[in-house]
């Protein structure tokens, strides 16, 4: 397959480039339409009680969603302000699609006790289609914001999703403006020439276009989370640079031994292209674990990110070779340095780890385990507007309400659906769970009881209410929904499916690494060392964002928990990224063994030849992830920090020290496989063909 792709790219480079230009136009034209389709309904899990109850209410409940406004900054009793508020309320009531707007001066609880803030909730009619709901929400928000007061903020309901979508688009744009120039500057340092440095950015732009287009296509069949934009774009950008870097370094090496650019491209695709192919497959397989979960959010993220990885992989093995055929003659070959000078720092690290393998393991493994300790106390929650940066309207509304109103004001209730046939005693016991319980009857005879929790939407009190209702109901036809109930069901889903997801990923990674190396011990060693770096990175995220240590340095604060989006995505993506660097190193080690070097020589040569690429790739990925952390959205900060630390720990401590130590400890046994599996690999395992043999040092 790789040879076919290489021949196509070298024989018809202009055609390949033209097809990719068309793809870019689709991505940045059609694909950007996804920004208007983003959803903030992360915890929905089809088939759970909370989701079934929500769908039931959608069918039978005539009431719709709602938005909330807060007016603050002057005395609410001011006659001029009161006149404006009352006129705005009257005008909003006349807007098509608005069901009700209570008088904030006559309704208890809507005026703050300190007299400095006023809440204006707006209830929407049920059954509105998306366009009608958007018009209603925008018209109502625009009219309320005409009130002349120091601070007027409107958010909540469908407006919250729109505001977060706008923030996501702004964050992506800013991250690209920050990361691309920095990445270009680093690539100029690495390659010393503008042409070589610019080519990875071309592949990176292709990755971004692929992210937009993949998300847009998936949005036609499923909900796309507001988190998807940043996550897929940062990963698409980072991996594209990684793959292009690997290919370009190999191309410049091949140019040392041949002046024929086409031949150098063929050799590059045959050798480095094989590594890129397996790397892309391992990242994609790591993300298949997300498909095991029935959560729409996790499945859509898994599919979207996997699609972006495939786009990056294809761009690296088709578009980049075509560009090299056209412009590769202007790219100078790598400097022909003496073997003792090439990668000497990494060779020294490899020799140090080989000589002190037991000591290296005795120090690094416990250190990584200590860093991973906070994971044992990890909590996941939905989070609220406190996770948003202070510049967003939703966060400003949250802060205003928090400053002027009692705790629990505006918090989503635990919604209990009492279907016909529920006895009165059960209903009374459920109402008694909250002193502020409210009931309403639906046309089909169902009673809906709203239980306001004393605290946050996802705190222990709220989830405790859900569990109490489910214990009290017995055999009665009672269902619980609302954000707290969805969180309870989401946690249960994670606990139930996580072992199967882990088994799926580990089995897939094992098979791919076996196909790549022909060994059964190397995959096991790789999985073990990767889990160490992943645990350390996730432990640091818990320590910072859950416990609050050093969070202020990142513009965040300790929230007592992580966003439920962060741990699954960090684990899935970081595991795949770690495989990137492992494959970069193993490919070079395998080449050295094939060229006749012994096992210890192969370890040193592998690190000597790949260390610079791995280090540069990790640094570039860290820059990309860091740029996306400038937006201030806590879940993205958590994901960005987790992936940055995972990449840096894996590319330095694990790959530069643990890999040579463990490979030397295993010796020739590292490449062992039972005879039946060896025959399977000899027949079906993929092997690079046509690559020029590497130079191997004569001594270690």
Image (spheres, grey):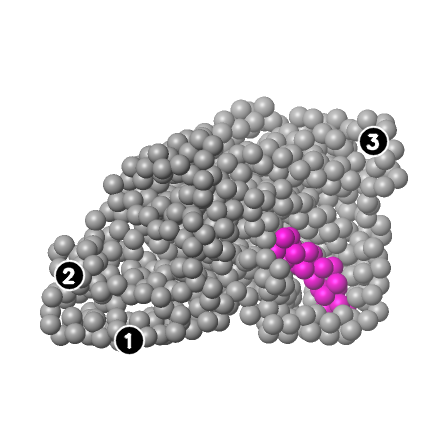
* Residue drawn at the location 56% of the way across and 27% of the way down: 361
Q: Position of residue 422 (x, y in %)?
A: 42, 39
- Mark nearest the camera among 1 and 2 is 1
Q: Is residue 349 visible?
A: no
Q: Which element is circle 1 on?
A: helix
Report the mark closest to the observer, 3 or 2. Answer: 2
For marks 3 and 2 on the same chain, the one whose residue lies earlier in the sequence: 2
Residue beneath disc 2: 116
Q: Is residue 307 magenta?
A: yes
Residue 206 drawn above or below residue 619: below
Q: Report the front residue among 559 and 416.
A: 416
**Badge 3: few (under 14), some or many (20 or more) residues near its Cα, within 10 Å?**
some
Q: Mark 1, residues whose alpha carbon is within 10 Å: few (<14), some, or many (≥20)? A: some
| Residue beneath the point at 25% across and 56% down | 401
- In magenta, the rendered stretch is 303-328
Q: CA distance from mark 3 to mark 1?
A: 76 Å
> In terms of sequence position, does the residue under pointer 1 or pointer 2 come before the other?
1
Which residue is disc 3 drawn over?
Answer: 677
């Amino acid at each position: 397959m790789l040879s076919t792709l290489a021949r196509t790219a070298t024989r018809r480079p202009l055609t390949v480039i033209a097809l990719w230009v068309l793809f870019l136009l689709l991505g940045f034209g059609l694909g950007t339409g996804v920004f208007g389709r983003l959803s903030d309904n992360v915890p929905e899990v089809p088939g759970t009680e909370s989701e079934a109850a929500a769908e039931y209410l959608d069918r039978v409940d005539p009431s719709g969603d709602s938005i909330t406004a807060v007016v603050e900054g002057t005395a609410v009793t001011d006659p001029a302000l009161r006149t404006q508020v009352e006129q705005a309320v009257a005008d909003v009531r006349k807007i098509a699609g608005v069901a009700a707007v209570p008088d904030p001066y006559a309704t208890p609880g809507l005026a703050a006790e300190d007299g400095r803030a006023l809440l204006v909730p707006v209830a929407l009619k049920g059954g509105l289609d998306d366009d009608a709901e958007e018009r209603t929400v925008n018209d109502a928000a625009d009219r309320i914001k005409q009130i002349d007061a120091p601070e007027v903020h409107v958010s909540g309901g469908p407006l919250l999703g729109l505001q977060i979508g706008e923030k996501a688009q702004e964050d992506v744009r800013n991250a690209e403006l920050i990361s691309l120039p920095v990445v270009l500057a680093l690539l100029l340092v690495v390659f010393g020439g503008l042409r070589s440095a610019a080519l990875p950015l071309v592949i990176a732009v292709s990755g971004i276009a692929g992210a937009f287009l993949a998300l847009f296509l998936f949005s036609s069949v499923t909900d796309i989370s507001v988190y998807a934009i940043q996550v897929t774009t940062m990963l698409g950008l980072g991996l594209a640079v990684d793959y292009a870097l690997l290919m370009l370094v190999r191309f410049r090496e091949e140019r040392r031994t041949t002046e024929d650019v086409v031949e150098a491209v063929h050799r590059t695709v045959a050798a480095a292209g094989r590594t890129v192919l397996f790397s892309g497959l391992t990242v994609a397989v790591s993300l298949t674990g997300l498909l095991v979960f029935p959560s729409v959010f996790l499945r859509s993220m898994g599919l979207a990110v996997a699609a972006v990885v495939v786009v990056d992989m294809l761009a690296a093995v088709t578009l980049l070779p075509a560009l090299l055929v056209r412009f590769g003659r202007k790219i100078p070959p790598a400097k022909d340095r003496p073997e003792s000078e090439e990668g000497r720092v990494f060779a020294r690290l490899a020799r140090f780890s080989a000589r002190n393998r037991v000591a290296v393991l005795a120090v690094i493994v416990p250190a990584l385990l200590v860093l991973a300790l906070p994971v044992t106390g990890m909590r996941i929650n939905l989070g609220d507007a406190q996770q948003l940066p202070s510049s967003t309207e939703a966060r400003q509304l949250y802060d205003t309400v928090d400053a002027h109103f009692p705790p629990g004001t505006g918090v989503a209730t635990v919604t209990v659906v009492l279907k016909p046939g529920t006895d009165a005693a059960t209903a009374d016991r459920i109402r008694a769970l909250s002193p502020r319980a409210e009931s309403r009857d639906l046309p089909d005879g169902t009673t809906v009881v709203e239980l306001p929790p004393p605290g946050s939407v996802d705190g222990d009190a709220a989830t405790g209410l859900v569990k109490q209702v489910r214990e009290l109901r017995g055999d009665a036809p009672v269902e619980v929904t609302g954000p707290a109930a969805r969180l309870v069901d989401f946690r249960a889903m994670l606990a139930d499916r996580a072992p199967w997801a882990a088994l799926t990923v580990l089995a897939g990674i094992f098979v791919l690494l076996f196909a790549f190396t022909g060994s059964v011990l190397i995959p096991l060693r790789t999985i073990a060392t990767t889990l160490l770096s992943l645990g350390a990175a996730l432990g640091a995220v818990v320590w910072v964002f859950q416990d609050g240590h050093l969070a202020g340095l990142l513009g965040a604060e300790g929230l007592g928990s992580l966003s439920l989006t962060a741990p699954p995505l960090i684990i899935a993506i970081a595991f795949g990224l770690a495989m990137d660097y492992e494959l970069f190193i193993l490919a070079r080690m395998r080449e050295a063994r094939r060229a006749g070097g012994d096992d210890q020589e192969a370890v040193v040569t592998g690190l000597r030849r790949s260390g610079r690429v791995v280090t540069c790739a990790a640094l570039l990925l860290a820059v990309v992830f860091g740029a996306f952390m400038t937006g201030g959205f806590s879940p993205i900060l958590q994901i960005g920090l987790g992936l940055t630390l995972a990449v840096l720990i894996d590319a330095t401590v694990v790959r530069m020290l643990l890999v040579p130590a463990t490979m030397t400890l295993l010796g020739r046994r590292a490449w062992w496989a039972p005879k039946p599996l060896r025959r399977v690999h000899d027949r079906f395992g993929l092997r690079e063909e046509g690559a020029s043999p590497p130079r191997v040092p004569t001594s270690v």
